[in-house]
Image: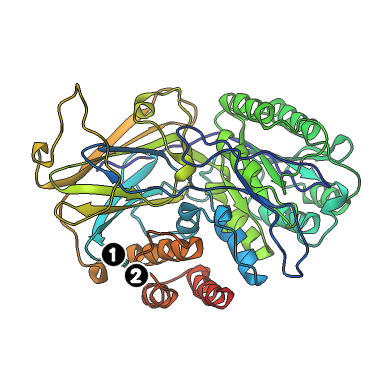
Amino acid sequence: MRHTTIACSVLLLIFAGCSDGGAAGRAAPCCPTASPGALIAGVQDVEGAFNTESYDEIAENPFLRVVDTPLSTLAVDVDTASYSNVRRMLNAGQRPPAGAIRLEELVNYFPYDYAAPSDNTPFAVHVDVAECPWTPAHQLVRIGMKGKTFEEGQRPACNLVFLLDVSGSMDQPNKLPLVKRSIRLLLERLGARDRIAIVVYAGAAGLVLPSTEATNEEAILRAIDDLEAGGSTNGAEGINLAYATAVKHFKPGGVNRVILATDGDFNVGITDQSRLVRLIQEKARQGVFLTVLGFGMGNYKDSTLEKLADKGNGAYGYIDDIAEARKILVEQAGGTLVTIAKDVKIQVEFNPAQASAYRLLGYENRLLAKEDFNDDQKDAGEIGAGHTVTAFYEVVPVGVPVSVPQVDPSRYQPVRTAEQGTTNDELLFVKVRYKDPQAETSRLLSCAVPAKAQPFDSAPADFRFAASVASFGMLLRDSPHRGTSSYDDVLRVAGASVGADEGGYRKGFLDLVRKAQTAD
């Protein structure tokens, strides 16, 4: 397969917490399997107190017959919020609600050692096939992407606007104080070419730090230190002011981004999600992108925040402690800030001569209609500098029994059979479309994948570790597709494939699996 590489421009908005008020369910970009209005709310905290956290219901992807549905189409997703949010709950002794567990975000939380692009394309694409560990008669297909990285000094200049909620509910250690510490960390990665502004909102919005050179640390730190929580929340005024500030100082060819740090609970101003989405989409088309960082618990509105990030050409992360802030804003600053490809879509065509059925693991709210793949007007996912993206398909080979709902034969169309597969030595064909960050026309990459699965134990360590994370997610969700998965198997496979583990995230995963065993 060819490889891909690009640069981009963005705007930063940080938006955090508020006192009360509701948020509607998250609407999928297109062809959703999840019901956008169905929320999982009222999670019990460890003391038994009722809270108002809300999560979309997720209907897991079923197995589909290849002869009926040979094409699978999705938008890529680099969000990681689900993993750190699930970690927060398990660390508190809670079992996460199923709606909080997005399988792709668990898998994509970890960096993987995919080869970077070797040409001028923004990312490289890799495909592996191995036996499926939880159902050995099946095959597991991994599609992996690796975004290009920038050498020190090559990163585009940044025009960042932080939007901070300073309403009364933010006066908790894991909210505004953690937001302030997080911004200080990001300053470590900025230089003389970069600018920062800070907008706050509570009952009213205000510009507490005009756009300032990042090297003027004294002024920036003074503005951060002076932030205090109090009042109700008017998120709408803050968003408008933050975008206006970003547009005023727009850097052509640079990173123009708003970073929103919030629990997503709006109670004054624009509470209608559709109006917020239209505003964010309009600004994204103008080159000002959005990153969403979630903070806090108790009134956390996951369903709102994921939707805003998706529509703002940005990523969604959840910061539960200062170590997670360092991961997102320091270690992965390139991916958090610099978009290298937008509207990235994957379409997989399965060969009926080799595969009788398949199932996409996760990405339920990122599914696209097959016609959307070639439609450049359809919004899709973004990839940041250095990002890795992983998608798994579980494939049922021809001849292996599988229970899949049947459809009646067509009265007018010819019935397709497995024998009609024209290339018998291919399992599937992968196509990827993407746009450069400032372009409106997509480019196409493609490759054929041979029908040859290696034994799972012989698969690359990264493949095995990622599969163990997917297995863990299915166990947490009590998925009907978990097969022979067990926490002991997850610990065995993940423990044997930890590898170098820079940052210790994989060892942290092992600890989390043990806590999940206890929670059960």
Residue type at numbered disc 1 = Thr
Residue type at numbered disc 2 = Thr
Residue at 51 percent across and 48 percent down: it is: 58
Q: Position of residue 478 (x, y in %)?
A: 47, 63
Secondary element under disc 2, as helix, strand or loop, is loop
Residue at 60 percent across and 66 percent down: it is: 95
Picture quadrant of residue 405: top left
In terms of depth relative to the viewer, which is nearer, 443 or 225?
A: 443
Q: Could you tell which of marks 1 and 2 lies nearer the N-terminus?
A: 1
Q: Position of residue 278 (x, y in %)?
A: 63, 25
Quarter in which the C terminus is drawn: bottom right
Q: Is residue 227 visible?
A: no
Secondary element under disc 1, as helix, strand or loop, is loop
Q: Is residue 483 visible?
A: yes
Label 1 crowd bin: few (<14), some (14–19), many (20+), radius 10 Å: some
Q: Position of residue 429 (x, y in %)?
A: 22, 41
Q: Which mark is on residue 135?
A: 1
Q: Are marks 1 and 2 in contact (CB under 8 Å)?
A: yes
Vertical arrangement, residue 288 with respect to residue 459, above or below: above
In terms of depth relative to the viewer, which is nearer, 409 or 343?
A: 409
The residue beneath circle 2 is 484
Quarter in which the N terminus is drawn: top left
In terms of depth relative to the viewer, which is nearer, 427 or 196?
A: 427
Whole-Å distance between the Cαs marked 1 and 2? Answer: 7 Å
- 295 sits to left or right of 324: right
- 470 sits to left or right of 109: left
Q: Which mark is on residue 453?
A: none
Label 2 crowd bin: few (<14), some (14–19), many (20+), radius 10 Å: few
Residue at 47 percent across and 60 percent down: it is: 110
Picture quadrant of residue 71: top left
